[in-house]
Amino acid sequence: MDLFPAIDIRHGRVVRLSQGEATRQTVYGDDPVAVAERFAEQGAEWIHVVDLDRALGDGENLGVVARIAARVGGRARIQLGGGLRSLDAVRRGLAQGASRAVIGTAAAIDPGIVGAAVRAEGADRIAVGIDARDGRVAIRGWTETSALEAAELARRVAGEGVRTAIYTDVARDGMLAGPDVAGARRLGAAGLEVIASGGIASIDDLRAVEGAGLAGAIVGRALYDGRFSLPDALAAAAGARPAP
């Protein structure tokens, strides 16, 4: 499976939010480009970048995204999310050098955008972020919970040609509580390749995601807190086991 070390950008800095709450923020660095460079040097083939300012309606960091893509281009691909709520925003994100754009809120509230994006950019360049709170889709930077069930959204976007979904259990994100593997597999039943996000705290968590046959895992706080190294995480994602 693919491993995606995460860089969440807010006001130009590398941060992590607990359960998506802007008031519960930990700053891990002032230079997202340097963090991306370190990830690429350590072997990351993908980097998951989230523009939290766009997601929260507080500006944007597309210039930073462009610098990240320029620095790691040819070594790591960028998967970009955060506030991509129109076809123009998706195109602008991809134009910065991202290989894949993640549509979140818009997929739930504007059904037409997903199919339009797939037709315009191709299924390989579009993913849908399905963020759930108690089984229902969380939107607008997780500040609201819609009536739409996550499984229903998964079926809808699969029908529109989407192949890849990123599933986050909001309650687990940034909490090191373990990933919701069962929830991710339920979305996979719609025919999607599902990347698990939120709650990963250990190498064993990564092995559980890999063993469940999921397409990938996004790692954030556990990596920044030093609970495991990126090379060890990449090995676990590849199915490697420690020597006896």
Image: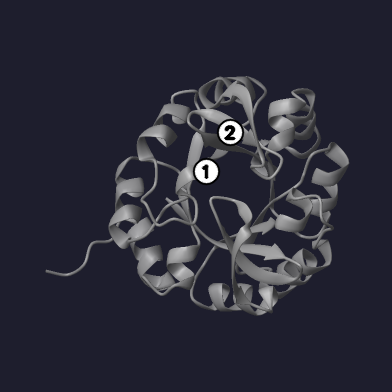
Q: Would you place residue 59 above or below residue 113 in this image? A: below
Q: Position of residue 196 (x, y in %)?
A: 46, 45
Few, some or many residues within 10 Å of mark 1 (<14, 14–19, 20+): many
Residue indicated by mark 1: 170
Q: Is residue 131 left or right of residue 58?
A: left
Rendered-image quadrant of the C terminus: bottom left
Q: Residue at coordinates 79% horizontally, 66% vertically from top-left?
A: 66
- Residue type highlighted by circle 2: Arg
Residue indicated by mark 2: 163
Q: Quadrant of residue 176?
A: bottom left
| Of 233 and 7, the residue lying toward us | 7
Few, some or many residues within 10 Å of mark 2 (<14, 14–19, 20+): many
Q: Quadrant of residue 214?
A: top left
Q: Secondary structure at mark 2?
A: loop
Residue situated furthest left in the rendering: 244
Report if the CB atoms under discs 2 and 1 are less than 8 Å apart. no
Scheme of colours in the image:
one colour
Q: Residue at coordinates 83% horizontally, 38% vertically from top-left?
A: 86
* Mark 2–mark 1 distance (CA, rounded to whole Å): 22 Å
Q: Position of residue 42 (x, y in %)?
A: 49, 76
- Residue type highlighted by circle 1: Val
| Of 129 and 214, the residue lying toward us | 129
